[in-house]
Amino acid sequence: MANGSDAVLGVTRDATTASDAQSENISARAPWHERHPLNGQANGARSNGAGIASRELQAQDDAAPVFRDRARTILPVEYQGREVVFEAYAYEDDSASYQALALVHRATSSSADELPLVRVHSGCATGDIFHSLRCDCHAQLQKAIGRVIESRIGAIIYLPHHEGRGIGLVAKIKAYAEQDRGLDTVDANISIGAPVDARDYTLAAKILKDLGFTEIRLLTNNPLKVEALQRLGIKVAEQIQHATSPSRYNARYLATKRERMAHKL
């Protein structure tokens, strides 16, 4: 963990920041962090590939809003007994079907050539909220928060609609019941007629572009996530392994992800 306050606080706490941090809807196309810097940066001070780089996204932006709604604020959170303040950005996609949250950390001394460290995290109610031991989601999220805090610039992109690798909460619990009967996580999904992995990363890619994070270092064990983001116009300069310690409840689950889903574990 970095000890300096710059590495802990994603924003400064002066009066200007507090005023600027009020939630609002924005229609301009420039990357949000350049239009409304939360940490006292001058507009354009950190572009990091800012701007809508994808022709596909530019075409969408010309034809219809990329987001139906969005808002921003600062969000203080407790992490391992410490207070950490993030920039928080909430998004609703243009179809009003999905919402997502981006928690951004920027050290005041970060430079324009530093690539952001990013975790694109699939929402998991049983793991993230109730700390279920059947998966590694809670451990991965907590580890990602710590690594982003330690970085000079980074973000957690949280996607609630990715519950159960995109099949939803009810289907996930049905798949758990199939695992209780002896199936692994792949065959359990197949047995209930669900895709093995139904996640779509379009909204995540749009959020990263809106933040100006078009080239990133990605915390993931999943090569398919890397491929999906790159197809959507996000350059993954580095895939960083993000493994956690297995428990007796999730050891088979993690082994299946490694052996049948090509995860780097």
Image: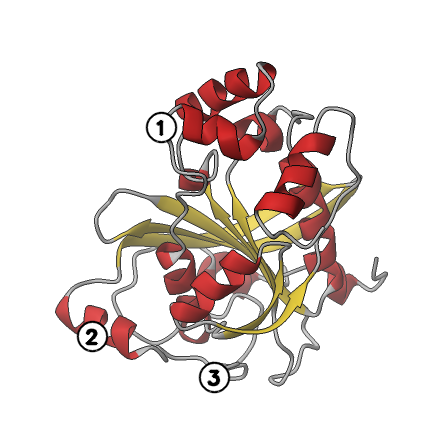
Q: Residues within 10 Å of mark 3 (few under 14, many from 20)?
A: some
Q: Secondary structure at mark 2?
A: helix
Say which residue label 3 marks: 44
Of residues 116 and 227, the one drawn nearer to the viewer in this rendering: 227
- Image point (46%, 71%), residue name: 234
Say which residue label 2 marks: 59
Residue 19: percent from left, percent from top: 47, 59
Give left or right: position of 263 versus 24: right
Q: Residues within 10 Å of mark 1 (few under 14, many from 20)?
A: few
The earlier-in-sequence mark between 2 and 1 is 2
- Image point (22%, 70%), residue name: 61
| Amino acid type, residue under disc 2 in the picture | Ala
The earlier-in-sequence mark between 2 and 3 is 3
Q: Looking at the picture, does residue 40 appear above or below residue 91? A: below
Residue 87: percent from left, percent from top: 54, 57
Q: Are marks 1 and 3 in contact (CB under 8 Å)?
A: no
Q: Nearer the viewer, mark 1 or mark 3?
A: 1
Q: Quadrant of residue 190?
A: top left
Q: Secondary structure at mark 1?
A: loop
